[in-house]
Structures are given as structure tokens and as C-alpha cells.
Image (tube, rainbow, N blue to C red):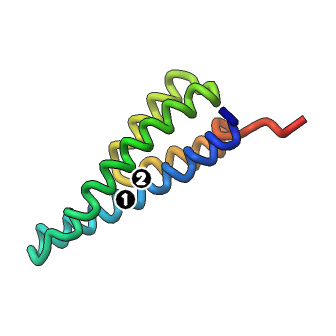
């Protein structure tokens, strides 16, 4: 697999996972606070679930292709649990060179 493609896929899925969290949280707010509709949860629940699974899979592929340490891999996986933490991890990974791809020769 091309490391550049894997790094890009990781970044896209990390942001998508955070956005699906936002949608699910908004749906939960509408469902439980004003108690007006369950549509947000019905839509964003499955979307978030699918993107979550995609994030875990892409994280495992990225860990292997980009040769992350076990600690970095574990941190990436744990970031999938709190809302928006995947974006925080992605920014940290870019800043520390964990998503850096060597330039072509």
C-alpha cells in the first residue's frame, strides 16, 4: 500500500469520525432535551457506527504501513472514543511526523 494514500485516508476518516460524532450528539440533544424528534439519532447513529468501524480499520492499516509504535497505535484507537478526539490525534500525528510520508526520490 502507498503510505501517502494511507496517510490521506487516515486524515479523511479521522475528520469524518469527528463530524459524525457532532451529528450524533446533535441528534441526541434533540431527542432528549426538547424531546421533539428521534430522526437525528436514527440517521446519525448508523452513520457514526459505520465511520467508527472505518476509523478503526484505517488506523490499523496506517499503524502497519506507517510503522507506528504500539503506543501511537493505542493512542489513535483510544482517540475514537471521546467526541472529536480523532481530530486532536490527527493534528498531533501531523505535527509530530507520524503522518509524514518521505518525499519521492
Name the side, left or right, on which 30 lies relative to 70.
left
Q: Which x, y percent locates residue 8?
A: 63, 48
Q: Which mark is residue 17?
A: 2
Distance between mark 2 and mark 1 Cα atoms:
5 Å
Q: Find numbered disc 1 in the image and state the secondary structure of the residue it sits on.
A: helix
Q: Which x, y percent locates residue 92?
A: 58, 44
- Relative to 27, residue 77 above or below: above
- Relative to 34, residue 23 above or below: above
Q: Which x, y percent locates residue 82?
A: 34, 47
User: Circle 1 is placed at which residue position?
Assistant: 20
Of residue 101 and residue 87, the one placed in the foreground of this image is 101
Which residue shows up at 20% across the image and 68% down it? 29
Which residue shows up at 46% across the image and 47% down it? 86
Name the side, left or right, on which 89 lies relative to 84.
right
- Relative to 55, residue 17 above or below: below
Which quarter of the image is occupied by the N terminus? top right
Residue placed farthest to the top in the image?
70
Marks 2 and 1 in Cβ contact (< 8 Å): yes
Which residue shows up at 58% across the image and 46% down it? 9
Q: Find numbered disc 2 in the image and state the secondary structure of the residue it sits on.
A: helix
Q: Which x, y percent locates residue 95?
A: 65, 45
Which quarter of the image is occupied by the C terminus? top right
Callout 2: few (<14), some (14-19), or many (20+) C-alpha neighbours within 10 Å? many
Residue placed farthest to the right in the image?
105
Residue placed farthest to the left in the image?
35
Callout 1: few (<14), some (14-19), or many (20+) C-alpha neighbours within 10 Å? many
Which residue shows up at 42% across the image and 43% down it? 54
Which of the 4 image quadrants contains residue 5? top right
Amino acid at each position: 500500500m502507498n503510505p501517502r494514500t494511507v496517510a490521506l485516508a487516515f486524515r479523511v476518516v479521522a475528520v469524518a469520525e469527528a463530524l459524525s460524532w457532532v451529528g450524533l450528539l446533535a441528534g441526541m440533544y434533540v431527542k432528549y432535551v426538547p424531546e421533539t424528534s428521534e430522526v437525528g439519532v436514527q440517521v446519525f447513529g448508523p452513520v457514526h457506527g459505520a465511520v467508527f468501524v472505518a476509523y478503526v480499520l484505517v488506523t490499523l492499516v496506517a499503524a502497519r504501513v506507517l510503522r507506528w509504535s504500539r503506543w501511537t497505535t493505542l493512542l489513535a484507537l483510544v482517540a475514537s472514543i471521546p467526541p472529536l478526539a480523532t481530530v486532536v490525534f490527527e493534528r498531533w500525528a501531523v505535527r509530530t511526523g507520524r503522518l509524514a510520508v518521505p518525499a519521492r526520490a
